Image (cartoon, rainbow, N blue to C red):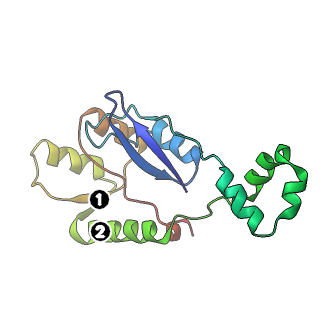
């Protein structure tokens, strides 16, 4: 999982988690990302500070018994440090559990409308149907159209078990 700080043209900043960088690009291209403040779907990644290895980290590593690192000198430190930083393989359990609870709450308290999601969302938005929570499926075209009409919606979180 990767966390990005995102921004809209009005400079509202917010954070979102993605399985990888391509997932962000795909969701942005499909119009699935929107600013929680103004609803804009013109979303970009904000500038973020890179994670930089500090001398304190080097000291901790050396005190742990890596005497050979000192003999190699600083020239080899940057590549070796990068190689020793494990890539996250999964979202922290707390995040997954929170997303699971969120999705469970929606599915228990909202009406499932299947492939008629866009149609029902429009009816509710334009007060042609009672105001209520709904969930279902929508095509990429439906998602773009709903966003352009200013109809608020949010994708349900994808959980690890959904990929089985």
Residue 74's spot in the image, x, y percent? 82, 46
Name the N-terminal-most of marks 2 and 1.
2
| x and y percentages locating residue 126 in the rendered image | 12, 41
Which residue is label 2 attached to? 107
Residue 44 sits in which quadrant? top left
- The Cα atoms of the two marked residues, 2 and 1, are separated by 7 Å
Please report the residue visible at 28 percent of the width from the left and 38 percent of the height from the top: 39
Q: Residues within 10 Å of mark 1 (few under 14, many from 20)?
A: many
Pick the front one: 158 or 81? 81
Vertically, is 55 above or below 142?
A: below
Task: Decide: is 140 above or below 149.
Answer: below
* In contact (CB < 8 Å): disc 2 and disc 1: yes
- Residue 27 position, x and y percent, is 47, 43
Point 46% across, 35% down: residue? 46
Q: How many marks?
A: 2
The residue closer to the viewer here, 100 or 12, is: 12
In which quadrant is the N terminus drawn?
bottom right
- The secondary element bearing badge 1 is classed as strand
Residue at the (57%, 65%) spot, across then down: 90
Element on which disc 2 rests: helix
Residue 135's disc is 1
- Can you give x and y, in whole percent of width and height, for residue 35 in the image? 32, 39
Comparing 37 with 30, the one in front is: 37
Density class for disc 2 (Cα within 10 Å; few <14, some 14-19, many ≥20) is some
**Rendered view: 90 above or below 122:** below
């Amino acid at each position: 999982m990767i966390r990005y700080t995102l921004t809209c043209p009005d400079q509202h900043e917010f954070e979102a988690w993605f399985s990888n960088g391509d997932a962000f690009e795909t969701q942005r291209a499909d119009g699935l990302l929107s600013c929680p403040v103004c609803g804009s779907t013109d979303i970009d990644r904000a500038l973020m500070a890179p994670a930089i290895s500090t001398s304190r980290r080097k000291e901790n590593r050396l005190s742990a018994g890596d005497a050979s690192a000192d003999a190699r000198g600083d020239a080899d430190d940057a590549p070796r440090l990068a190689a020793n930083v494990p890539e996250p393989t999964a979202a922290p359990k707390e995040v997954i559990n929170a997303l699971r609870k969120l999705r469970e709450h929606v599915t228990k308290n909202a009406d499932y409308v299947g492939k008629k999601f866009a149609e029902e969302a429009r009816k509710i938005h334009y007060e042609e149907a009672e105001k209520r929570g709904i969930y279902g499926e929508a095509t990429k075209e439906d998602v773009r159209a709903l966003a352009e009409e200013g109809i608020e919606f949010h994708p349900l979180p994808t959980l690890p078990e959904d990929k089985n």
